[in-house]
């Protein structure tokens, strides 16, 4: 049986990711026309833009909830971690592309660094915590 400390370390990557992504999702979608101008400094008035941010909220909420399910139900841990690695890697890739084409944003560089760290942490967890017979 694995130690409680080992389980905590294994699940911390999903748990912290879930907290951050659930919070970001709510920030993006609860009231985009009031919250986003304060946080990001741009107005959200068009219906289509509000719809995009609420769709992002839905995506973030569903992913964050699934990562919590991955913590609670061990049979979902590996899939939740793979999805987390892909999500964090995808966000980091998009930020790298934006940095190349649009320039450096100090606000988003923090996000880029954190996304790369969470992606690497997830890859490490998958390599070190998935039994050999389950690896392809």
Image (cartoon, grey):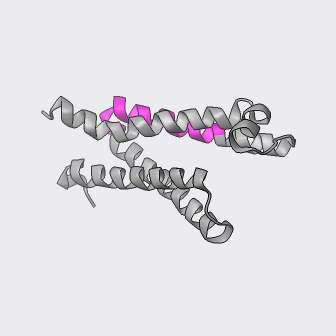
Using the image, determine if residue 130 lies above or below residue 16: below
> In which quarter of the view is residue 4 placed?
top left
Residue at x-position 39% and y-position 39%:
14
Q: Is residue 63 magenta?
A: yes
- Farthest left residue in view: 1
Residue at x-position 73% and y-position 36%:
38
- Farthest bottom residue in view: 100
Residue 72: image location, x then y, percent: 35, 29
Using the image, determine if residue 30 lies above or below residue 41: above
Query: Camera-side residue: 41 or 116?
Result: 41
Left or right: 80 as drawn, with respect to 10:
right
Image mark count: 0
**Quadrant in which the C terminus is drawn:** bottom left
Residue 110: image location, x then y, percent: 51, 51
Q: Is residue 73 magenta?
A: yes
Residue 59: image location, x then y, percent: 60, 41
User: Magenta-highlighted stretch: main secondary structure?
Assistant: helix
Query: Camera-side residue: 42 or 19?
Result: 42
Image: magenta residue range: 57-76
- Farthest front residue in view: 106
Using the image, determine if residue 87 lies above or below residue 136: above
Using the image, determine if residue 93 lies above or below residue 88: below
Residue at x-position 78% and y-position 45%:
42
- Farthest right residue in view: 46
Query: Camera-side residue: 27 or 2?
Result: 27
Residue 55: image location, x then y, percent: 69, 41
**Quadrant in which the N terminus is drawn:** top left
> In which quarter of the view is residue 52 placed?
top right
């Amino acid at each position: 049986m694995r130690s409680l400390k080992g389980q905590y370390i294994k699940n911390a990557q999903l748990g912290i990711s879930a907290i951050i992504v659930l919070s970001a999702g709510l920030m993006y979608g609860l009231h985009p026309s009031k919250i986003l101008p304060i946080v990001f400094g741009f107005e959200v008035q068009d219906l289509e833009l509000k719809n995009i941010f609420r769709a992002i909220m839905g995506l973030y909420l569903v992913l964050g909830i699934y990562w919590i399910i991955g913590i609670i139900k061990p049979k979902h841990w590996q899939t939740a971690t793979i999805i987390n690695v892909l999500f964090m890697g995808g966000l980091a890739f998009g930020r790298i592309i934006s940095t190349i084409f649009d320039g450096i944003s100090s606000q988003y560089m923090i996000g880029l660094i954190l996304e790369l760290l969470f992606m690497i942490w997830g890859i490490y967890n998958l390599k070190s915590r998935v039994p050999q017979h389950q690896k392809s």
